[in-house]
Image (spheres, rainbow, N blue to C red):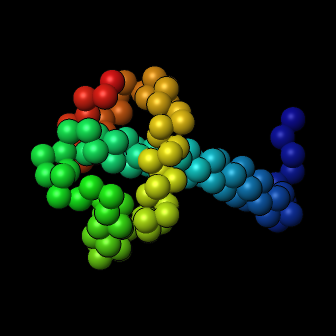
Amino acid sequence: MMKELTFETLVESIRQVHEQLSAQAGRAVNISLTLRNWIIGLYIVEFELRGANRANYGEKLLSELAKQLTKLKISNCNRRQLYRYLRFHRLYPQIVGTLSPQLRLPGELPITTY
């Protein structure tokens, strides 16, 4: 038997769907940002290992990369954050095994580590 459709029921139904889907969206964003940060670390590792002009950057790679990404208004990519992403990737290289096979890494950087 259905509940009587009242104004209060309408309000409560909307509140419930809002809370449930907002929480779900928050989890999806957290997963996406975690994956983004890990992939940024992966790209940095790949460049350090195989970048054609990596010798030009050496120790200043993260500083120079942070400058360029800041110019492009890419958030949370200062030198300190980039170092954290690099460490995150190095600490958890196995994350790649959990990625969906349908996921294609964006960007043009060839990935050869795995």
Q: Relative to residue 47, is residue 93 drawn left or right?
A: right
Q: Relative to residue 96, is residue 18 drawn left or right?
A: right
Residue depicted at x 43% and y 29%: 96
Q: Quadrant of residue 110?
A: top left
Residue depicted at x 49% and y 26%: 94
x, y percent for residue 22: 66, 56
Give whichever of 96, 60 is nearer the camera: 60
Q: Relative to residue 15, is residue 69 drawn left or right?
A: left
Residue depicted at x 79% and y 63%: 11
Q: Is residue 17 visible?
A: no
Residue depicted at x 23% and y 59%: 57
x, y percent for residue 69: 32, 68
x, y percent for residue 50: 20, 39
- Quarter in which the C terminus is drawn: top left
Q: Is residue 101 visible?
A: yes
- Quarter in which the N terminus is drawn: top right
Q: Is residue 1 above or below residue 13?
A: above
Give whichever of 9, 89 is nearer the camera: 89
Give whichever of 68, 13 is nearer the camera: 68
x, y percent for residue 14: 73, 59
